Amino acid sequence: MMIDLGGRVAIVTGAGGGLGREHALLLARRGAKVVVNDLGSATDGTGGSLSAAEKVVSEIKSAGGEAVANGASVTDFEQVEAMVAQAVDQWGRVDILVNNAGILRDRTFAKMDIADFRAVIDVHLMGAVHCTKAVWEMMRAQAYGRIVMTTSSSGLYGNFGQSNYGAAKLALVGLMQTLGLEGEKYNVRVNCLAPTAATRMLEGLLPQPMLDALSPVRVSPAVLALVGEDAPNRKIICAGGGSFEEANITLTRGVFIGDADDAGEQLLARRNELGDRDGEIVPARGSVQGEVELRNAGFQLAEVAEA
C-alpha cells in the first residue's frame, strides 16, 4: 500500500535545504500541502533569509503540489503560532509536524560558552516544544496528528565536541516518549528520527563518495513512514544511506544488593552482572523501572499494583 498523504497539511521546519528540503518535497509528492519553514540562517543560526524556503516552494509548485513559505524562528513562540495560523488560514488544519530545524555550535565542553550551549538547546529542544505546543490542541481536537522529532546519534550515543547538541537531541527523545503516551488516545502519534546525511553540517568531514551515499533523499522515506495513517508511536528510527534501524532505550534485569554498608562496593564488584543484557527489556513507560526494582526486592507485581 502506497502511503497517501492527500488532504493532509504538513509543517516542516528547517526545510530550506538539506534534510528538511527532501522531507518537504517527498511529503508534497505524496499529496500533502506543505508549509516550508526556514529562517534561512547559517549552520550556527546566524543571519536569515526567506529565499531558501521560497525556492523549495517553487519546486513543489512546479511539480504540481501546494506549498507556502514561512520564515518564522522556531525559538520565538509567537512567530511559531503565526506560522500555524498561516497553515490553518490557507488549508484549514495541520496534520503533520516535522521538527527538523537545527543549528550547530560545536566545541569541547571546556571551551564552550554557555551562550552557545543555550542557543543549541533553544533551537533544537525549545524549537520543537514551541512548534509542537502550537499544534497540539488542534491535533487532539481533530483526533489526528503525526509529529516527528529529529534526534541524533550524538544524543543517543554521544559525540566528541557536541555536548550541547547531544543534550538537546536526547531531550527530544524524552519529549517524544511522554507526548506519545499523552497523545495516543487522541490518535496523535509522536516519533523520533535519527538521520545520517550529507548536509551543510557534514561538509568537509567525510570523503565525497561517502557524502554521495549519504544523500538526504535516502533518509526522507523514514519521515514518510512516520507521518502516514499507519505510523507507529514512540519509536526511534535511524536512517542513513538507504539503511534503516530502530534504536531502543533498554533496561537490564539488574541485581538486588539492598542497603548494606558496602552496597556501593558490591555494585562495582557485580557490574558485569548488572550490565548483562540477557533478558533486558524496553520499558513501555517510566514506572516500569520501579516495578522491576520492587520485583528484584522480593515484591510480587500484584502488591505493586495495589500500592
Image: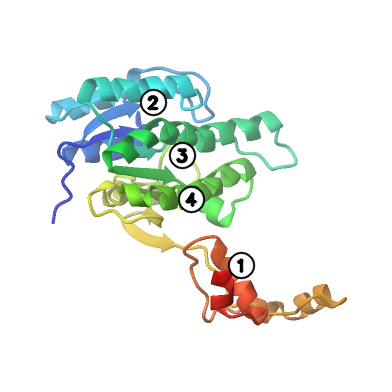
Q: Is residue 233 above or below residue 294?
A: above
Q: Which residue is tagged 1?
A: 290
What's the residue at 32%, 44% (across, down)?
Answer: 146
Q: Foreground: 132 or 159?
A: 132
Distance in Å between CA atoms under marks 2 and 4: 27 Å
Q: Which secondary structure, mark 3?
A: loop
- Asked whether 110 or 228 is in front, the reply is 228
- Tell me, for residue 104, which label it has, or none: none
Q: Earlier in the sequence, mark 2 or mark 3?
A: 2
Q: Amino acid at mark 2?
A: Asp
Q: Residue 101: x and y, percent?
A: 44, 34
Indicate which label's residue lies in the foreground, 1 or 3.
Answer: 1
Spot the residue most to the front: 306
Foreground tag (2 vs 1): 1
Residue 119 sits in quarter: top right
**Observer-nearest residue: 2 or 145?**
145
Tell us which disc is closer to us: 3 or 4: 4
Q: Secondary structure at mark 1?
A: helix
138 relative position to 122: left or right: left
- The image's mark for residue 38 is 2
- The residue under label 4 is which amino acid type? Thr
Label 2: few (<14), some (14–19) or many (≥20) C-alpha neighbours in 10 Å? many
Question: Which residue lies at the image location 39% right of the left edge and 36% below the top edge?
Answer: 136
Q: Nearer the viewer, mark 2 or mark 3?
A: 2
Under circle 2, the secondary element is loop
Q: Position of residue 211 (x, y in %)?
A: 39, 47
Task: Of the two numbered discs 1 and 3 on the same chain, state the one appearing first in sequence.
Answer: 3
Residue 273: percent from the left, percent from the top?
Answer: 66, 81
Residue visible at 55% across and 60% down?
A: 286
